[in-house]
Structure formats: structure tokens, C-alpha cells
Image (spheres, rainbow, N blue to C red):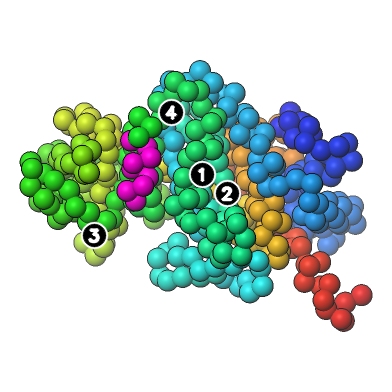
Amino acid sequence: MNEFLSPYEVLFDKRLGKRFRDTIQGIIGAESLRVMKIATFSPNRQENASSTAKAIYRFLWNDDFSAQELLKPLYKKTKEDFRNEKKVIGVIDLSPWEKPYARKMEGLSKVKKKDKSGTVNGYMAVSVLFISKNKKGLGYFHLFSYEKFSYEESMSQNKQIERAIEEARKLLPAEAKITWVWDRGFDDGKNYKDVLGNGEDFIGRVYQNRNVEVKGKPRKLLDWGEGLPVKTRFKTKMFFKGKVREVEIELAWGKCVWKGEVLYLLRSQIVWVEGIDIRSWKEEDRTWWLLTNIPIRSRERALKVWEIYRKRWAIEDFFKFVKDGLGGEEFQVLGLARIRKLVSMVVIAGAFIYDLGPTTETPLVQVLLMLGGWSGSKHDKPGKEVLKRGLSMLFTYIVVGEFMKGYKGSS
């Protein structure tokens, strides 16, 4: 823990550094719902929780540093870890942080629900995760609003994406070749031109039926793709409905030209899933439309492109862990700057647990694992799901001071 937190101490004076340490340690080791329930029967635990709450509150109100400054040590570690890498996968993601019950938080805007059933109050987060061999590193993270009440929020979503890519690039050596991987939220010509103009590769999921040329004739991308003949089938294992299942997938691909750029469309379609009847699935749930500038001229290259795109799940797993396992969407504070700081603290705690691999020998981790149901036995090997349960409500302490200030009945 000391090794993990020490890079942050250079950002603060001694007194503020201690507050930060207390805050992060409290987030990781003291603030789950189960701990707070136990605390009602333990005066010592109540005192610790109270101290942590005060530390969080003071940090949120301190204007001497920003959310991005809190994340700088994680960026620095990425820069150091990737300093000799020649080929890097850059997974970039847009995800909603839903706040369905919030009404007065600054900058609340309408975002699409994760289940695609409509919109809900919340914010958007743009993030970059770098992957190379067995390394992973945070390249960028930023929570933003669609409400235009400041210069920061006057930036369009495309500008937010552009800045994310630009800032993340700075962490890698100039000679590193990046292959960007993104979901349908990045299906925009500006993103393609930016990456291609920088001499980089991309693999992106598409939904726009854009104009392309095929053998010199104008076509609609997805209409043309529907008619591509299946060239290969393969079986792999994927996670569906709570378990890893065997899956059969068929691939089709072809070459097209978009605004003078030679691109390749790869159609990946699930045709069978072990133990699940997929006949009622929507087409979009069964099919990936992948556009790339990486030449696909063989089955081996098509499988390689498919496998690289699959790596985007690494960032989805991480931020699902941060949001769901650590309760990253549970907080209720008013000011957007403070919301960003709070989210940054959640990301820091998640990076420690998810990426830096604490063991069961670490006392704080032992506490969390036991709260998640671990017996403490050396023969019982707990996993991340146990950690998730132990951290099921990371922020059960809610910063209510901002709300209570205007309440006349408070004392």
C-alpha cells in the first residue's frame, strides 16, 4: 500500500498528503456497506469510518488540485512501463455513468442507458487503456457533461475524444505503433482521419451505413457487407449469462475505399452458443461490423483482427469493476469538479485492486476478502468476485454536507 500511494505524496504538502493517504486507505479498506453495518456494533470501527468521511469531505472541497492531478501518478506509471514498447493496443471507450435519482448535481445531462432502453440523468466518461503483451496501463480518464455551462463542457463529444487520444499518445515513445480499438460510439470520420493521418492502425465497430467504393462502384458499407460470403468458421469461448460458454462464429470480409483510404470490413456473426437458443437475439447482438485499415487477405489475418478487437473487453472489465464492484455510480455530490475528484479516487482504488495485484497476505485485502465471504483458509483461493462483494458499496458514505447546508432543520 505504501509503495502504491507514495508517488502521490509529491503532489501535496505533508498535512494534505496524510489526508489523501487516509482517504484512499479508507476507500479501499473501510467504506463498504458491510463494514459500515459491522461498525454499528464496534465503536473503534465507527471512529475510523468517521475519520475517513472527514478526509473525503476535505479533499472534495480543496481547490489546490484537480481530478487529473490525482491521476497523474497512474499516467506516469504507464509511461514508465511502456517506454520500450514498439507495438501497443490502445483501447478507447465511452461509457455512461448513470445517476437516475440525482436532480441537483452540477452538469447533469441525459445519457443513453447501458441497456439501451432510453436515456437517464448522468455523465459520460472517456477512457484509454493501453495493452502490450502482459502489460496494461491507464492512458486517460475523464468524466464530462453535455451541459455547456463552462469552457470544459462546451467541448463536443468529438473534441473530448480527440483530446483523450492526444493526451494518451504523449505517454508512449514516439516510435511506438498504436493500434486503436474502439466501439460504435467512435464511428466518426474525424476519428478515422486523425488516426490514419498519424500513421496508426485502427479496428472499430461501425453502425453507419456510410458511402464507400467497391471495385470502383459506389456502395453503402453495411448493405455491401450483408452480401459478403462467409469465408471461415471457428469456435472459441466467450462469457454469456454468467458463465464461459463455447461459441461458434463465422467471418466474412472484403476490401473497400472510403475517401481515398483503403479499408477492410470484417463481419463477425455468432451462429451458435453452448446451452443458449440464440434465434430470438437481435441482429446487433449477434453481429460485429468491424472496419479497419489493417489488410485482411487471409483467414489468419481475419482471426488476428477479431482477436485484437476482443481485447477491448479489457477496458470494459476494468471500468465495470470500478463502477459496479466499487460503487462508482453511488456518489451524490453537487459540484462537477468535486464529482470528478471523487470518481478519480474510485479509479485509483480500482487500479490498485484490479491491476496491481495485492495478495491475500495484505491485511487490508484480507479484511475485504472476508467481507466478501472468504473463509480465511489457505485452501480457499478467493478471486475478484469476492473482492467485488466485499466492496459492493464502496461509497456508502455519501457526502451530504452540501445538501444539508441549506436545510434549516439541520444542526
Q: Which residue is mark 2?
A: 142
Mark 2 belongs to which amino acid?
His
- Looking at the rendered structure, the secondary structure element under dot 4 is strand
Q: Are marks 2 and 1 in contact (CB under 8 Å)?
A: yes
Q: Which residue is mark 3?
A: 283
Disc 1 crowd, CA 10 A, few/some/many (<14, 14-19, 20+): some
* Sequence-first disc among 1 and 4: 4
Mark 1 belongs to which amino acid?
Arg
Q: Are marks 4 and 2 in contact (CB under 8 Å)?
A: no
Q: Quadrant of residue 397?
A: bottom right
Disc 2 crowd, CA 10 A, few/some/many (<14, 14-19, 20+): some
Q: Which residues are magenta?
A: 188-196
Q: Which residue is mark 4?
A: 88
Disc 4 crowd, CA 10 A, few/some/many (<14, 14-19, 20+): some
Residue 3, horizontal then vertical, whole percent:
74, 28
Q: Are marks 3 and 2 in contact (CB under 8 Å)?
A: no
Q: Which residue is mark 1?
A: 163
Q: Nearer the viewer, mark 2 or mark 1?
A: 1
Residue 58, horizontal then vertical, whole percent:
83, 53
